[in-house]
Image (tube, rainbow, N blue to C red):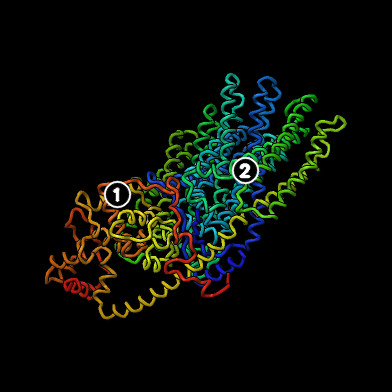
């Protein structure tokens, strides 16, 4: 399908495009980190709560994890405003189009996130109220997690759809857009990133003395819990590599380029030492889980930054021609607008000269035409009707106009035109009677 | 390459200062597009006035009182109230704020897209302050109990509270500037800068009114909640109620003053823009509805506050609940009037509420809007397609504010005007042609005569058969045709051919 080419907003960007691009990449990375921690936190809290049915220490852990979710969820939302604002600024024609096409589900993000947050508060703040009904507590936790799992899919659908104007005419509602390539694959990659990032975070977090003390855990349990998270992190990074490869081969060709491919490969390669170290820590008894932790995080941060830049590169590749076409069309359109305005100005000057020759018509059109059409009743009776009622009686029209009564039940009352003097009123009245 | 294009556009926009934009049309036919924004925005505004800007200073005040009087009941109450504020503001409060972005982008992307280009840095600054506000409220709330461990920690904690209250107010100060701009572009029409748009004549009175209203709203809601939480300690209830009531009463006096100030500035300003005598009738009706609500509402709330000061602890909680509802209604109506008197514009003197710019009109009225709307499904009007062409014109020019069968239904409007008699398309066309003169809140019709006739035929057909209008979120966009997939079509000049290799 050929892509529609809309017009852009012809107001200048508030800053150089390159600067806004960098701001977009950085602010989006910050946002997505908190989203990962929020989603992963909710997931891990649920998992630990289920484990906690048999091992009470995990139940305490599940509660404490929800405390991090409280903070991370609010930061995820507030940090999301900047990339939203910048996307609106840089990609108005594309992003507003894709948002409208999935409009109902896009708008649903608001009540769904609100509900997820409220459930998270019920889940956390009333923890001790559910002692006799753990099933309900788990149900609330599960619903909260399901919402956190579903909502990013809406965002991914929108962000994907905006890249491919050639698909816009094929979309009817959210689900058809969600099934476009390669939303679901990207979603899986996003999911494993959430597990990876939050597992690493909770591994580090449970290593802190203050957290251990507040959880009242013995040393063996601490090791057990930390190993639990580390193992999850390792599983997640393997899954991340696999889904990453799947995303790579399923990406629509529209945005592919060799530089983009090389950045993806580079980003993936940088993660390899981290995987090696993690594997070593898990399997080799002469290594502690904490070994090389800073290096591992360093690798993943680099990978994330490279992927963040590559994402933007892909977007720019996919939309390069479309953006140029939009710019051309906008410029052509604006030239036409100018032309039409110039024509209208000339026409106005001409009619002004004609009006000077016909003061009755001018005054009538300025004051009366809004409600009194020449031949048809609109807000008030037509000029023809008035002419018939007031035949040969211009002063009658004047008197009525200065203080209108109410003759017609189904009409709006006429306001008084006391600001017009008698000369003007006579001119108008005579114009009316001459029609 | 793309940068050259941006420069070219910048060049043209500075030179021509006009243009238009087009987007697939999202539409809700039951509650209507305006109500989508209204529900979200009013909820947001009630929460941020009453529970953020208004209530947070009171929390700090209560915490301070507890420290000074060395009575931990104050502290416990302050924490309990803050918990409620925290829950409401970080869920419904925050999300309805984002919701305004979402809904405005769906309902009028042309307007919000234009505002972002002009006010990007204003909103960016606002966002920085939001980040501070969110961080501060989390710190303030989550560190409350640990701060009680030492007087030094407690002092720091209290300071946090004051910072939080200040930042909350600053976000209001920034957003009001942008709202004021939409009503009055000030020097922006000639100046086009952020600063010239920010400092318009409506700004200070609106900010003053909102600040005082927020403080009173915060006071009343905190009085109501405190009443609920002090059921078993009457002497404490008396003390708390006295402190909050006194605080609120000072602001109440301010509110009366700022309400008068704002009520004076708006009419003088808006009526100056209105040329025809008949339109003042409509305006006066709208303004009166707010004035009466203000007079009676503020009188009632003043009475409740006065009794709360005089007979602290004895005023029944229900009076606070009613006062809160009255204040919410005042704020809601205030927002409604503000939105209404901005019409027919969505950005004063620049863009009409239909999303079409003032400067686009000569072109659209000459060629017809269907020629230039990228996502239109009809281009040419013939004697056979009058109704479907008319419906297309309706979509492009009327649906931002009207529905077919829902809120602000066009069918109901026509019924009010023409009743049971057969609706005649030529009468309707004659009316719409000059409608903007009689109804000042309506934009002029942005199409040519053939389109006006087709629209009128469609509208007349609604008497017998009114099918609800579905937006692109249900129907999708039409198959792209030559006009929508080309950069040059119809009477559009091809600048590439004229100016050569500039792109």
> Would you say residue B186 is visible in this rendering?
yes
In the rendered view, tell whether residue A345 sits above or below residue A280: below
Residue name at image x 29 percent, y 60 percent: B453
In the rendered view, tell whether residue A216 sits above or below residue A70: above
Pinpoint residue A67: horizontal percent, then vertical percent: 66, 34
> Would you say residue B150 is visible in this rendering?
no
Q: Secondary structure at mark 1?
A: helix
Q: Which residue is mark 2?
A: A186
Q: Nearer the viewer, residue A74 or B372?
A: B372
Q: Nearer the viewer, residue A45 or B337?
A: A45
Pinpoint residue B255: horizontal percent, then vertical percent: 47, 51
Q: What is the count of numbered marks?
A: 2
Identity of the residue furthest to the right in this view: A286
Q: Which residue is mark 1?
A: B411
In the rendered view, tell whether residue B431 sits above or below residue B471: below
Q: Where's the N terminus of chain B, which quadrant?
A: bottom right
Residue name at image x 55 percent, y 67 percent: B9
In the displayed structure image, the side of residue A187 where residue B185 appears, left or right: left
Chain letter belonging to callout 2? A
CA gap, disc 2 and disc 1: 46 Å
Pinpoint residue B133: horizontal percent, then vertical percent: 61, 47
Q: Secondary structure at mark 2?
A: helix
Chain letter belonging to callout 1? B
Pinpoint residue B176: horizontal percent, then vertical percent: 51, 55
> How many residues crowd around disc 2 within 10 Å: few (fewer than 14), some, or many (20 or more)?
many
Q: Nearer the viewer, mark 2 or mark 1?
A: 2
């Amino acid at each position: 399908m050929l892509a529609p080419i809309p017009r852009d907003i012809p107001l200048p960007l508030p800053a150089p495009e390159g600067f806004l691009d960098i701001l977009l990449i950085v602010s989006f990375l910050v946002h997505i980190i908190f989203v990962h921690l929020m989603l992963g936190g909710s997931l891990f809290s649920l998992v630990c709560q289920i484990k906690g049915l048999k091992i009470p220490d995990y139940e305490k852990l599940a509660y404490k994890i929800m405390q991090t979710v409280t903070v991370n969820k609010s930061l995820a939302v507030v940090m999301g405003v900047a990339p939203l604002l910048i996307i609106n600024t840089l990609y108005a024609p594309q992003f507003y189009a894709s948002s409208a096409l999935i409009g109902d589900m896009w708008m649903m993000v608001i009540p769904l996130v609100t509900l997820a947050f409220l459930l998270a508060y019920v889940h956390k703040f009333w923890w001790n109220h559910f002692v006799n009904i753990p099933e309900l507590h788990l149900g609330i936790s599960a619903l909260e997690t399901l919402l956190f799992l579903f909502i990013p899919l809406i965002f991914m659908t929108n962000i994907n759809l905006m890249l491919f104007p050639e698909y816009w005419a094929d979309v009817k509602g959210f689900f058809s857009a969600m099934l476009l390539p390669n939303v679901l694959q990207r979603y899986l990659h996003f999911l494993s990133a959430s597990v990876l990032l939050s597992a690493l975070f909770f591994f580090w977090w449970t290593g802190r003395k203050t957290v251990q003390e507040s959880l009242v855990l013995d040393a063996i349990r601490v090791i057990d819990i930390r190993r639990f998270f580390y193992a999850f992190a390792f599983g997640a990074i393997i899954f991340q590599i696999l889904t990453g490869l799947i995303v790579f081969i399923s990406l629509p060709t529209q945005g592919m380029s060799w530089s983009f491919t090389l950045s993806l490969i580079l980003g993936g390669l940088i993660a390899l030492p981290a995987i090696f170290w993690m594997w070593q820590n898990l399997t080799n008894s002469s290594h502690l889980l904490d070994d090389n932790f800073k290096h591992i995080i360093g690798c993943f941060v680099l990978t994330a930054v490279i992927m963040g830049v590559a994402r933007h590169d892909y977007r720019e590749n996919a939309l390069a021609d479309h953006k140029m076409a939009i710019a051309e069309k906008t410029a052509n359109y604006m030239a036409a607008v100018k032309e039409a305005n110039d024509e209208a100005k000339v026409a106005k000057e001409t009619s002004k000269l004609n009006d000077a020759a016909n003061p009755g018509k001018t005054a009538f059109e300025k004051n009366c035409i809004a409600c009194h059409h020449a031949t048809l009743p609109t807000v008030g009776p037509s000029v023809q009707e008035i002419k018939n009622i007031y035949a040969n009686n211009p002063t009658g029209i004047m008197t009525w106009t200065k203080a209108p009564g109410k003759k017609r039940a189904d009409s709006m009352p006429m306001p008084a035109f006391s600001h017009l003097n008698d000369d003007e009123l006579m001119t108008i009245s005579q114009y009316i009677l001459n029609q | 390459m793309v940068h050259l294009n941006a420069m070219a556009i910048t060049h043209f926009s500075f030179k021509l200062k006009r243009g238009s934009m087009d987007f697939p049309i999202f539409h809700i036919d039951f509650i209507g597009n305006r109500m989508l924004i209204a529900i979200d925005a009013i909820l947001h505004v009630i929460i941020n006035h009453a529970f953020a800007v208004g209530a947070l200073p009171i929390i700090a005040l209560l915490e301070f009182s507890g420290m000074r009087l060395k009575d931990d009941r104050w502290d416990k109450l302050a924490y309990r109230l803050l918990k409620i504020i925290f829950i409401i503001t970080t869920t419904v409060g925050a999300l309805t704020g984002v919701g305004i972005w979402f809904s405005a982008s769906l309902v009028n992307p042309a307007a919000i897209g234009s505002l972002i280009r002009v006010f990007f840095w204003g909103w960016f600054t606002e966002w920085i302050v939001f980040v501070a506000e969110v961080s501060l409220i989390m710190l303030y709330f989550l560190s409350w109990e640990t701060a009680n461990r030492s007087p030094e920690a407690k002092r720091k904690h209290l300071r946090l509270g004051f910072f939080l209250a200040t930042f909350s107010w600053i976000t209001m100060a920034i957003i009001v500037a942008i709202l004021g701009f939409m009503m009055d572009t000030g020097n922006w029409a000639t100046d086009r800068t952020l600063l010239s748009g920010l400092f318009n004549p409506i700004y200070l009175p609106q900010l003053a009114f909102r600040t005082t209203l927020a403080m009173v709203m915060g006071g009343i809601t905190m009085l109501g909640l405190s009443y609920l939480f002090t059921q078993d300690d009457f002497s404490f209830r008396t003390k708390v109620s006295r402190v909050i009531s006194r605080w609120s009463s000072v602001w109440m006096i301010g509110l009366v003053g700022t309400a008068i100030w704002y009520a004076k500035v708006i009419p003088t300003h808006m009526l100056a823009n209105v040329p025809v005598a008949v339109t003042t009738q409509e305006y006066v009706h709208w303004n009166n509805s707010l004035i009466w609500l203000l007079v009676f509402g503020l009188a009632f709330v003043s009475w409740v506050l006065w009794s709360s000061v005089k007979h602290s602890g004895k005023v029944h909680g229900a009076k606070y609940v009613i006062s809160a509802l009255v204040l919410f209604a005042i704020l809601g109506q205030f927002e409604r009037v503000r939105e209404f008197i901005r019409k027919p514009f969505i950005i004063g003197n620049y863009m009409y509420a239909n999303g079409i710019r003032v400067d686009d009109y000569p072109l659209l009225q000459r060629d017809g809007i269907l020629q230039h709307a990228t996502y239109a499904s009809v281009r040419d009007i013939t004697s056979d397609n009058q109704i479907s062409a008319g419906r297309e014109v309706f979509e492009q020019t009327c649906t931002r504010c009207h529905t077919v069968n829902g809120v602000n239904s066009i069918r109901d409007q026509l019924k009010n005007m023409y009743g049971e008699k057969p609706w005649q398309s030529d009468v309707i066309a004659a009316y719409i042609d000059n409608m903007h003169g009689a109804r000042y809140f309506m934009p002029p019709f942005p199409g040519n005569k053939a389109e006006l006739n087709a629209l009128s035929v469609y509208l007349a057909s609604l008497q017998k058969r009114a099918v609800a209008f579905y937006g692109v979120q249900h129907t999708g966009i039409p198959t792209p045709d030559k006009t929508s997939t080309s950069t040059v079509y119809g009477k559009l000049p091809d600048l590439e051919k004229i100016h050569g290799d500039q792109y």
